Image (cartoon, rainbow, N blue to C red):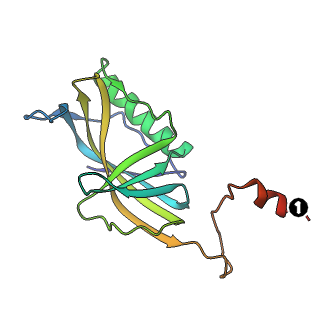
Amino acid sequence: MNKTVSLGEECGNYDNIVLQEAKNTHKYGKMFYLKDRIYLIQRNPSTSYNEWTSAKGEQQLRLGLTADLKTELDNIEKAVISKMPDLVFKTHENGSLYLKFGKTCEKSVESHGELQYVIEIYGFFVQNSTGCTYFQMDLMEQQSTKVSFLNKPTALNYVPNSKTWDDSAKF
């Protein structure tokens, strides 16, 4: 049975995680699948993201790594390591998470807007060249809304990133 976790509302329990080694080797290393996929749902809109197209023509997304998302990824890592203690996961030191858009995920994201999303974690692989372990995950679903200062926002989740903005608010 797949597991869904609403980020910021609950913490997932991954004690029953089941790993299955892939029969074929991934081109970068050994691949493992989760018997039950994990879906991390971010309902509170985020403004910390941007998208780009890779050299292979694939749409990709960079998400700012929130405390809630980092906690869930850390908990999943711990559960996997409890089953396979020799694994060393690649940490997210730069505060970002990079994702490919899933096959059925809408690929049009509003620039400079608010984003809600679902991340599907379906496995991980151990890279032959470094020995580091990486999650296999995709952006399964996303919904973005353009930020508008003309309409009175009900709950705008926008954090100004300019000192000028902060200084102008002091009358």
- The x and y percentages for residue 131 are 28, 22
Q: Which residue in the structure is indicated by mark 1?
A: 170
List x then y, in percent, for residue 99: 35, 50
In the visual, does 69 lie left or right of 98? right
- Residue pushed farthest right? 171
What's the residue at 24%, 23% (across, down)?
Answer: 129
Q: Secondary structure at mark 1?
A: loop
**Quarter the C terminus occupies:** bottom right
Q: Position of residue 84 (x, y in %)?
A: 28, 22
Q: How many marks?
A: 1
Q: Is residue 35 left or right of residue 23?
A: right
**Between residues 84 and 168, which one lies in front from this camera angle?**
168
Q: Residue lying furthest bottom in this view?
A: 151
Image height check: is 139 above or below 105?
A: above
- What is the residue that sits farthest to the top in this orientation? 86
> Residue flagged by tag 1: what amino acid is it?
Lys
Q: Residue at x 39, y 54 (%)?
A: 61
- Residue at 46% x, 51% y is 63
Q: Nearer the viewer, residue 14 or 58?
A: 58
> Going by the image, does 95 lie left or right of 34?
right
Left or right: 24 in relation to 96? left
Q: Position of residue 62 (x, y in %)?
A: 43, 51
The image quadrant that residue 159 belongs to is: bottom right
Q: Is residue 143 above or below residue 56?
A: below
List the single residue furthest toward the left.
23
Residues packed near mark 1 inside 10 Å, few (<14), some (14 to 19) or many (20 plus): few
**Vertical position of residue 90 compared to residue 102: above or below:** above
